[in-house]
Amino acid sequence: MSPPGVHVRLGMLLRQAHRHAARAFAEALAPLDLTPRHYGVLLVLTRDGVSTQRDLIGQTGSDKAGMTRTVEDLETLGHVRRTPSPTDRRVAEIRLTDRGRAAFTEATALAEEVGRGLFAGFTEGELATVESVLSRLVAGE
């Protein structure tokens, strides 16, 4: 059994670690006029090729209003294009543009640089342990 309060402390540390990493990533993306939320959508579209707003909400954990703003932002920046679905005219398909693919490549390089900075003081073994523990936590094991 865990000592009293350990779960609360771990929860707080996870939240603080997330905020620290998210802030560093947001600062790195700012010169590209991107946010971590934008990056998440670019990541899904790079992986899947095409998506809908509903699917992006499910994939990223966003809410409907936030995703609407995110897709509009990316469209304004020229990173995505919305077109009517050929099977359901009420649904828009969202795809990356060439500009969006280039922005994703540049943002990924920045993300890797931020990651190297965040984890510079860890050994490969420590990183493997952290990844394993967090994967189990996310999977609900």
Image (spheres, grey):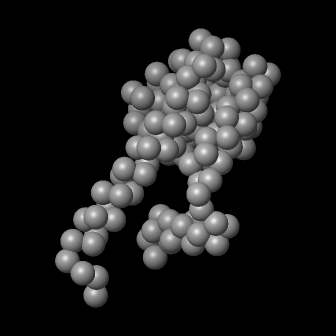
Q: Residue at x 39, y 57 (%)?
A: 14
Q: Nearer the viewer, residue 31 or 81?
A: 31
Q: Quadrant of residue 48?
A: top right
Where is residue 51? Give x, y as percent.
Answer: 64, 36
Q: Quadrant of residue 13?
A: bottom left
Where is residue 31? Give x, y as percent.
Answer: 60, 19
Q: Residue at x 28, y 70 (%)?
A: 7
User: Is 42 left, or right, of 90 in this rendering?
Assistant: right
Specify whether residue 43 is in view.
Answer: no
Q: Nearer the viewer, residue 113 or 64?
A: 113
Specify whether residue 39 is in view.
Answer: yes
Where is residue 55? Give x, y as percent.
Answer: 55, 41
Q: Is residue 8 above or below residue 120?
A: below
Q: Residue at x 61, y 45 (%)?
A: 117
Q: How many marks?
A: 0
User: Is 23 left, or right, of 118 in this rendering?
Assistant: left
Q: Is residue 53 above or below residue 5?
A: above
Q: Residue furthest left?
A: 4
Q: Residue furthest top?
A: 76
Q: Quadrant of residue 30?
A: top right
Q: Is residue 42 above or below residue 77?
A: below
Q: Residue at x 79, y 22 (%)?
A: 98
Q: Nearer the viewer, residue 25 or 63?
A: 25
Q: Residue furthest bottom?
A: 1
Q: Quadrant of the N terminus?
A: bottom left
Where is residue 86? Give x, y as percent.
Answer: 70, 28
